[in-house]
Amino acid sequence: MSSTVLFDVPGPRARVRHRLLAVVGVAAIAALVGYVVWRFIDTGQFEGRKWSWIEYKQIQISLAEALGRTLSAFAVGAVLALTFGAIFAAARLSDHRWVSAPAAVVVELFRAIPLVIMMFFFYYGLPATGIKLSAFTAVVLSLMLYNGSVLAEVFRAGINSLPKGQSEAAYALGMRKTQVMVLVLLPQALRAMMPTIISQLVVLLKDTALGFLITFEELLYWGRQIGGQLQFGRPLIPTMIVVAAIYIGLCLLLTWFANYLEKRNRRNKKVIALENKDAEMVVLTNDHQA
């Protein structure tokens, strides 16, 4: 379906109005950024004293350690979330009601619970029952359950979006349902959904910053500790600028990787085009709910 079917093509006056609104919007954003920069300069956020902390070797080492903890939580959480998503997507696609129904309840339950509440429950709530988890374990467990539930829906939507002829041809060759799922549908769906999966991993990476709320010593926690140092003039803004730049760099790297895979898939004739975009809609819906 052509995109022009969804809306009327703007006329000359509408195009002029859109251009004026775009210019006004860009000017408003530039003014806001300029005001923020001016306030930073006016309050001395760019003074040498507030940036001298970055010259100390011990602080550089602690920054690298904090970055390592963030990446560790991301890596472990991503692997567990992908595993969780694959298992529960397969369970939701089962023909057996006693398998698909409990899986649907689990997925919908953990998609609905805010990530912060899960972190607080695992770290502060479970000790009341005699179970004590480290901050790292609580963060990783929460990332696995929340993002794994979203990925389960992405996997399920992607498999359902494959052309029916793929499974019908496999069944005609005498394959069982497990073989059709593992050997035929899942590999194609994974390749086709890779950009969407990586987009969700970008969300998972940003979610690691919430571990700061339960004293997990990741990048944001490190920034608050250094930002409160009196001998450097409490450089909270400079440290947050550094932390934000690191997060933005990591997210851009993952986004670039997703775009690279998408372009590569377009050139790969082995990748089957999905019949609809349900998988992307799962991620977009989840982003709006977060």
Image (tube, rainbow, N blue to C red):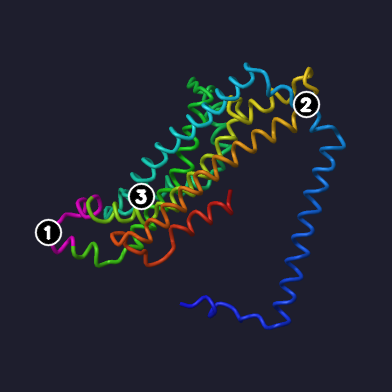
Q: Which mark is residue 200?
A: none
Q: Position of residue 176 (x, y in %)?
A: 16, 54
Q: Which residue is mark 1?
A: 174
Q: Which mark is residue 89?
A: 3
- Name the quadrant containing residue 166: bottom left
- Separation (CA) of disc 2 from disc 3: 50 Å
Q: Are marks 2 and 3 in contact (CB under 8 Å)?
A: no
Residue that appears at 56% across and 24% down = 64
Q: Which residues are magenta?
A: 170-182
Q: Earlier in the sequence, mark 1 or mark 2?
A: 2
Task: Categorize mark 2 by other alpha carbons within 10 Å: few (<14), some (14-19), many (20+).
Answer: many
Residue 99 lies left or right of residue 6; in this view the side is left
Residue that appears at 30% across and 66% down = 163
In this rendering, the answer to whether 39 lies above or below 197 is above
Residue that appears at 79% across and 33% down = 46
Q: Which residue is mark 2?
A: 50
Residue type at numbered disc 3 = Ala
Residue type at numbered disc 2 = Lys
